[in-house]
Amino acid sequence: RPSPSPARSHPAPENGGSTDSCRVRVAVRVRPKNSEELAHGADFDSCVELQPESKRLKLKKNNWSCESYKFDEVFSENASQKRVYEVVAKPVVESVLEGYNGTVMAYGQTGTGKTYTVGRLGKHDPSERGIMVRALKHIISSMSFETDRVAISYLQLYLESVQDLLAPEKTNIPIVEDAKTGEVSLPGAAIVEIKDLEHVFQLLQIGEANRHASNTKMNTESSRSHAILIIHLQRSSRIKEENSCSLSNDTHDIFPDDLPLVLKSKLLIVDLAGSERIDKSGSEGHMIEEAKFINLSLTSLGKCINALAENSPHIPTRDSKLTRILRDSFGGTARTSLVVTIGPSSRHYSETSSTILFGQRAMKVVNTIKLKEE
Ligand code: ADP
């Protein structure tokens, strides 16, 4: 049986021009001060100043030392969920609708707004909705249900074990890479076809409840695990509009009664575990184990980003399950956006600084296989 067609590749820049269009986009979002920070005033002074016009962020270490960093966008505490979606995720979603793979990730210290940015449901208050709900709404409204299909898998990666948030009895789901196409799949994970926004809310709510329940059972915080939403898209309507894209007339496991000619793509939306360093000295038993694994997956993500940013011939994607799942998101054909979230308080200067530096390195990563072949 033929393997599924890979998603499309982005074109290389013309005349060896700028690679900027293929670069990983990175935005920084500052969370509003919380009640503790507001109550303690000067003690929790802000160490962050934004310059929205120049898209710069100034990070103040003390009265004498201040660094300035440029991002693709800087979001203040007043930025709306809608604006964050439009800048960070919408271009990726549009590209996924055209048949490319895409990834949107949130990275930052626990409590800085990753889940708020990515996973907030906002069922009754549309202005509160995060990237997952907005992306699915955007996809549903752009599709023709006669010829197109969309399905989701929702997973949690905890202690190097992939668990299914839609079918919690499924644990230790394997990660498989297609030897020919390099495409990553997770056989055994539930893939649920969706039809409307109500169904999206239902599934995301189930996922959220299972994430909470499994973390309570394991006596851990959700900030210790990575949540990964995979949106599988299969479109025939686009084929009528455009003939030059890669087509497939094979069958694919995801949708059992496959359409004859389809364009396939997937979007990964990832709420990463808290990036803070975990104090191992105070940890016991499974906490030490946990600290090791959380550090392993985020450290290995950092290593891959460094290697890609430096154009290294070896990208160590096999070092952790997180980087294996994200293998075709970085440096491949995918279009990738990262939002790094930070708190405003000078109390967390060192974590904020390391989050900012992670974001700065990710900005150097250029995606596209064609570019690499040049
Ligand atoms: P994380 O996922 O990084 O641990 P959360 O998303 O849980 O952080 O955010 C921590 C708290 O701050 C939550 O109560 C959340 O509602 C609030 N929060 C985070 N970002 C914002 C924001 N931009 N606007 C309003 N509240 C926010």
Image (cartoon, rainbow, N blue to C red):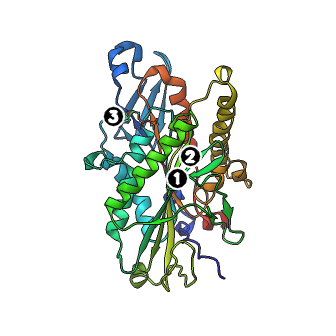
| Mark 3 close to ligand 1, CB under 8 Å | yes
Mark 3 closeness class: few <14, some 14–19, many ≥20 residues within 10 Å: few
- Quarter that holds the N terminus: bottom right
Question: What residue is shown at x 52% (from left), y 53% (from top)?
Answer: 24
Where residue 123 appears, x then y in whole percent? 29, 50
Q: What residue type is labelled 2?
A: Ala
Q: Indicate whether 145 appears above or below 312.
A: below
User: What residue sits 32% from the left and 48% below the top?
Assistant: 129
Q: Distance between the residues labelled 3 and 2?
A: 23 Å
- The percent coordinates of residue 23 (x first, y second) are 53, 55
Please determine whether, in this image, residue 224 is positioned above or below residue 135.
Answer: above
Question: Looking at the image, do the residues carrying marks 2 and 1 touch, with CB atoms under 8 Å apart?
Answer: yes
Q: Where is residue 181 in the image (x, y as percent from the top left)?
A: 66, 71
Crowding at label 1, few (<14), some or many (≥20) Cα neighbours within 10 Å?
many
Quarter of the figure that contains the C terminus? bottom right
Q: Which residue is located at x 31 percent, y 67 percent?
A: 141
Going by the numbered disc 3, the residue's amino acid type is Glu
Q: What residue does disc 1 label?
A: 24
Pointer 3 residue: 77
SS of the residue at dot 3?
loop
Q: Which mark is residue 362?
A: 2
Q: Which mark is residue 366?
A: none
Q: Which of 194 and 327 is in front in this view?
A: 194
